[in-house]
Image: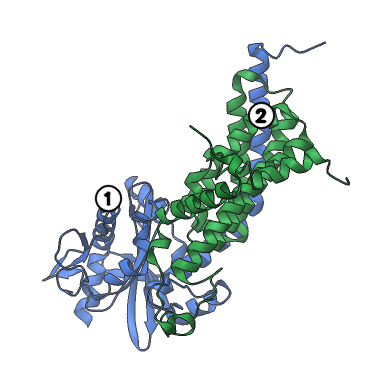
Chain colours: A blue, B green
Amino acid sequence: MAINKDKNSYTVIFAAIMVVVVGSILAFLASGLKERISENERLEKQQNILYAMGVHENVDQGSVNFIPTDRVAEEFEKYISEQLVVEGNTAKPYDEAYLIDLQKEETLAKKGATRKLPLFVGNKDGKKFYIIPMRGKGLWDAIWGFVALDESMTVQGVYFDHKGETPGLGANIKQRYFMDDFVGESILKGDAYVGVKVAKGNNDPVNKIKDDNEVDAMAGATITGDGISAMIKKSLRMYKPYLETIKSKS
Amino acid sequence: MGLLTKKDASLILDPLADNNPITIQVLGICSALAITAELKASIVMAISVVFVLGVGNVVISLMRNIIPSKIRIIVQLVVVATLVIIVDQVLKAFAYELSKTLAVFVGLIITNCIIMGRFEAFALGNGPWKSFLDGIGNALGYGLILIIVGFFRELLGSGTLLGFKVLGDPVEKTGLYATGYENNGFMIIPPAALIVVGIIIWVQRSRNKALIEDN
């Protein structure tokens, strides 16, 4: 018996079978590769944290080179002395705090749960770094990053990344020239926590003025830049009580 | 003739030169501009498209007699999206850094006009073996242009090839840089790809006058 392919029932059955087959192939693949993928993501977070505190293998003016994945676990052990979770003005140790999913925490916090705020303490050449993870919104999708502060609340290094900002424009937030501009800026204005703003027309294109809480914006990427400003402000605000105690100790 | 008949061979060879998807049919330009700033990304994109188009053409060809014509475009989209997700997941597991560079563009393969074009124009009307050859041929033709563009953009823009400093060190001023040579920053931004593709089209058409449309 020949099947009438023009019948609606055939179309519906065909579509249903197709969805089931494709769905199971993808589910099988995703569960098979899950372990490897999450391991890659774990190492990447370690690389990012180390990058923010200046542990990297940059060779020239333009390159962003992380510690290679085969060495990153041991370097992370070496430079990161404490992994903490901040609660108000206290902090307690937390194993593998870098695996805390900031997005999940944010959703949970909306439902009333206490938000886990990870903080990493790094030691390099006798200097102490406080590294804070951040997460925010760019133009198209999520942006995130890490900022490394010293005791005086001066930015020592940052790392930014994004999911889908425009290549050549917003995607440049992970370029050296943009990230390096943040180094030396203070997140304090007087005693207020203002963060660091990505500002248009701040008359400081080479970023010589370090006490204005501003870095020069990227042309053509206003919304991504504003996203960075908002992300820094919002993320640091939650750590304020604890950062105060660090500052008063120094 | 051994494995391939003359007609089969032309399915693979034509898209490499006189019926190239990028330079003659002007398809798939978007990704050719976007990811060719370095050779490595070009090569990976080329391999991914060879995989997706080769396998996709075979799958569509095998299903061509049972696909209900009312929803054939949707079926094509599902097939290509599935293959792209497979490529994406495999890259994430085995070449993580690369998958981050390609992240946006791997998704864009789904909308790559070459793929839908070959499904619709060839695989729906031909057997699996022919469709496989056609898919590989077109993907290689696309990949070839990508690699040529990537080669020149990385060489002239960053002075490297696959990350190796072939022209010397621009900071230490060794090699070619000792003579005062500088990298051309323009080559790194997307419009440079347009110019390289333009030059390829120009060279190709001046060598084969039959390709010039008269109007």
At 28% from the left and 78% from the top, the residue drawn is A150
Residue A211: x and y in percent read 15, 73
Which numbered disc, 1 or 2, marks the residue closer to the eye?
Answer: 1
Type of amino acid under label 1 = Ile
Instruction: Name the residue tied to disc 2.
Output: A18
In this picture, is B90 found above or below B53?
Answer: below
Cα separation, mark 1 vs mark 2, equals 40 Å
Q: Out of A43 and A100, give the one closest to the viewer.
A: A43
Q: Give the quarter of the image for residue A234.
A: bottom left
Type of amino acid under label 2 = Met
Q: Residue furthest bottom?
A: A126
Residue B80: x and y in percent read 61, 38
Report helix, strand or loop for mark 2. helix
Residue B65: x and y in percent read 74, 23
Q: Out of A81 and B18, give the one closest to the viewer.
A: B18
Using the rendered image of the protein, determine whether residue B38 is visible from the camera's viewpoint: no
The disc numbered 2 marks a residue on which chain?
A
Q: Give the quarter of the image for residue A39.
A: bottom right
Drawn side of residue A149 relative to residue B161, left or right: left
Drawn side of residue B90 relative to residue A136, left or right: right
At 56% from the left and 41% from the top, the residue drawn is B24
At 28% from the left and 53% from the top, the residue drawn is A220
Numbered tag placed on residue A223 in the rendering: 1
